[in-house]
């Protein structure tokens, strides 16, 4: 018999919950909607990825990936001034947005809301890197448009208890 967490996460609505979580966070923190798009996020010279670990009822990660201009705009919306470059403030802002999205997403599932913990954010920057997770039970990969910018948010599940 499937566990309650497994039953919740196998519903077709889990991607819609991610869309709702992303839009809620962007409307609240940046004052602008963030809507799903079909096209992928274009590779750019510099990519910024925030990673939040998930542990407990579900083990895995939430990632938010964007280009430098998107990261600068998100940080500007959060703090009120446009950063000149990718600095610690921008990395903190991207990490916090990822943290809020992960929290909002898991909050939409009763079992995960109380039974899944989040790690502190890690932020990776560079031009040619891949994040690798061991075995994936499932993965939600969604692309979004925020103003004229695009970003990718993924939920990667390694296991469900």
Image: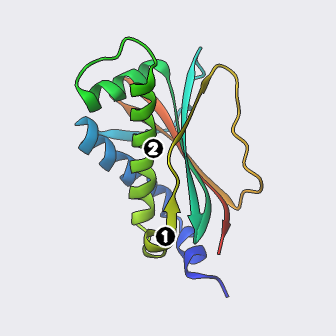
Q: Which mark, residue 98? A: 2
Q: Residue at x 35, y 39 (%)?
A: 34
Q: Residues within 10 Å of mark 2 (few under 14, many from 20)?
A: many
Task: Quadrant for the N terminus, please.
Answer: bottom right
- Does residue 41 appear in the picture of this structure? no
Of pointers 1 and 2, the one earlier in the residue sequence: 2
Q: Is residue 58 left or right of residue 37?
A: right
Q: Is residue 65 visible?
A: yes
Q: Is residue 148 above or below residue 37?
A: above
Q: Nearer the viewer, residue 56 or 65?
A: 56
User: Residue 33's image quarter?
Assistant: top left
Q: Position of residue 20 (x, y in %)?
A: 37, 53
Residue 102 badge: none
Q: Secondary structure at mark 1?
A: helix
From the image, tell me which residue sits under label 1: 112
Picture coordinates of residue 119 (x, y %)? 52, 53
Q: Position of residue 39 (x, y in %)?
A: 53, 32
**Which class describes the residues within 10 Å of circle 1: few (<14), some (14-19), or many (20+)?**
many
Front-most of residues 140 and 83: 83
Snapshot quadrant of residue 132: top right
Q: Residue at x 59, y 14 (%)?
A: 45
Colour option used: rainbow
């Amino acid at each position: 018999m499937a566990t309650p967490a497994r039953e919740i996460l196998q519903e077709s609505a889990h991607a819609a919950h991610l869309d709702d979580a992303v839009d809620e966070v962007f409307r609240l923190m940046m004052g602008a909607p963030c809507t799903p798009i079909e096209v992928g996020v274009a590779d750019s010279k510099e990519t910024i990825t925030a990673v939040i670990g998930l542990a407990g009822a579900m083990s895995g990660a939430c990632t938010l990936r964007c280009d430098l201009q998107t990261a600068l705009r998100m940080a500007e919306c959060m703090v009120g001034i446009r950063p000149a470059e990718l600095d610690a403030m921008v990395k903190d802002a991207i990490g916090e947005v990822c943290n809020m999205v992960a929290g909002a997403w898991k909050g939409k599932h009763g079992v995960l809301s109380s039974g899944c913990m989040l790690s502190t954010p890690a932020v990776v920057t560079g031009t040619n890197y891949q994040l690798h997770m061991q075995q994936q039970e499932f993965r939600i990969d969604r692309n979004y448009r925020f103003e004229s910018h695009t970003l990718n948010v993924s939920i990667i599940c390694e296991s469900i208890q």
